Image (cartoon, helix red, strand yellow):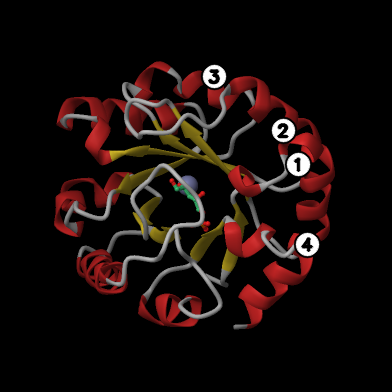
Amino acid sequence: MPRLIAPSMLSADFGNLHRDCRRVNRSAAGWFHLDVMDGLFVPNISFGFPVCKAIAEVAEKPMDAHLMIVEPWRYIERFAALGVKYLSVHYEACNDRRLKECIKLIRDCGMGVGVAINPETPAEVLIPYLHSIDYVVVMGVHPGYSGQKYIPETTEKVAVLAEMIAGAEADCFIEVDGGVSVQNIAELERLGAGVFVAGSAAFSSGDPKTAVRALLDA
Ligand code: DX5
Ligand code: ZN
């Protein structure tokens, strides 16, 4: 797949949320990435439905919601109703039965199905699910905050995962989330990642248009 950038709206200016959404619309970004945190699965609380709804009003590109919450199965239908196109839940937030239930529900709601894994979770735990999901979210930082330093071991995990996916002949892409920059994006793509979430890299210089271009060209 061609390299796709998904700016994380967690790094947007919430006082100018619609302006920042329009800037993403005008950029070469592929998706909007929505980081939903509940203060339980992760130590931070980000935003919920009202903010996602405000983004949905203006977003002209698909929304990719990343649920960093406990009991994600309770909220899947509500994200679908907001128009979210891709939805990921965390492996660590579910047991096997619940994860299968989430995968089915996300699929039945017509969204792309993603499963995210934390830095300390080995890629191999996803082997049983590779044929039923559309993408894996590999965390490059501990979930909870944008602007953290990239964890270098993530690179090897992407390589392992890409081999696993190829070996299983699964139709599944890899999204890297956290710490993505012009320094590491080319290597991550070479090893098999296709979608790149960018929080601070997309917004810290002001207009994401230039930053997204730089990430695509790096
Ligand atoms: C971390 C979030 C990421 C984060 C990315 O919990 O899932 O999407 O906001 O931010 P950067 O790109 O600054 O690491
Ligand atoms: Zn995220």
**Which callout, 4 or 2, points at the residue further toward the start of the chain?**
4
Is 197 placed above or below 108 here? below
Discs 4, 3 touching: Cβ within 8 Å: no
Three-letter amino acid code at the position of disc 4? Ser
Classify 10 Å Cα crowding around label 3: few (below 14), some (14-19), many (20 and above): few
Mark-to-mark CA distance, 1 and 4: 12 Å
Residue that mark 4 sits on: 27
Mark-to-mark CA distance, 4 and 2: 17 Å
Is 25 placed above or below 89 here? below
Using the image, tell me which numbered label, if any, was put on residue 59: 1
Q: Residue furthest top?
A: 74
Discs 3, 2 touching: Cβ within 8 Å: no
**Which callout, 4 or 3, points at the residue further toward the start of the chain?**
4
Using the image, tell me which numbered label, if any, was put on residue 82: none
Judge from the rendering whether residue 198 lies leftward or rightward of residue 53; answer left or right: left
Residue that mark 3 sits on: 78
Judge from the rendering whether residue 2 lies leftward or rightward of residue 72; answer left or right: right
Question: Which of 170 and 164 lies nearest the eye of the viewer?
Answer: 164
Residue that mark 2 sits on: 56
